[in-house]
């Protein structure tokens, strides 16, 4: 269901999250995906390397260590309701 969203008033108050998958494995840890997070206020984009096969726990830790610990807890998270985001 589409809803009108108010413009955020502060950085990292509202974020969008989605995946880029199907990549050729690379790097020391053979990452094959990115969790892409966009701050709707500043339009800052963070690309967090991960594995498509990562568990919800791994993704939660990735989010905690790279977003919450540095930017705070967002008020609104917009996603496509991927099971890794909603479980």
Image (cartoon, grey):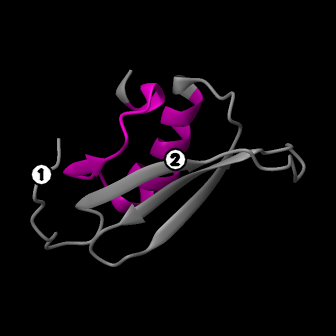
Please tell me how crowded label 1 is: few (under 14), some (14-19), or many (20+) other residues with Cα within 10 Å.
few
The N terminus lies in which quarter of the figure? top left
- Asked if labels 1 and 2 touch by Cβ distance under 8 angstroms, the answer is no
Q: Is residue 72 magenta?
A: yes
In this picture, residue 67 sits left or right of residue 8: right
Please tell me how crowded label 2 is: few (under 14), some (14-19), or many (20+) other residues with Cα within 10 Å.
few
Q: How many marks?
A: 2
Of the two numbered discs 2 and 1 in the rendering, the one whose residue sits closer to the viewer: 1
Residue 11 x/y as whole percent = 27, 71
In this picture, residue 34 sits left or right of residue 64: right
In the picture of the structure, the residue carrying the numbered disc 1 is 3
Which secondary structure, mark 1?
loop
Q: State the residue lying farthest toward the bottom.
A: 42
Which secondary structure, mark 2?
helix
Tag of residue 87: none
In this picture, residue 28 sits left or right of residue 65: right
What secondary structure predominates along the stretch shown in magenta? helix
Residue 85 x/y as whole percent = 41, 33
The part of the chain drawn in magenta is 58-85
The C terminus lies in which quarter of the figure? top left
Name which quarter of the figure residue 4 lies in: bottom left
Q: Does the magenta stretch include residue 25?
A: no
Residue found at x 17% / y 49%:
2
Residue 22 x/y as whole percent = 73, 44
In the picture of the structure, the residue carrying the numbered disc 2 is 65
Residue found at x 13% / y 73%:
9
Residue found at x 25% / y 59%:
14
Name which quarter of the figure residue 13 lies in: bottom left
Residue found at x 26% / y 53%:
74
Query: Nearer the N terminus, badge 2 or badge 1?
Result: 1
Measured Cα–Cα span from mark 2 to mark 1: 30 Å
Residue 32 x/y as whole percent = 77, 44
């Amino acid at each position: 269901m589409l809803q009108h969203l108010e413009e955020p008033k502060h950085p990292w108050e509202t974020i969008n999250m989605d995946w880029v998958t199907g990549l050729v494995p690379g790097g020391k840890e053979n990452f094959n995906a990115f969790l892409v997070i966009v701050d709707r206020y500043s339009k800052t984009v963070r690309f967090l390397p991960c594995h498509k096969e990562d568990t919800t726990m791994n993704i939660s830790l990735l989010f905690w260590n790279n977003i919450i610990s540095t930017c705070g807890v967002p008020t609104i998270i917009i996603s496509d309701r991927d099971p890794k985001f909603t479980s």
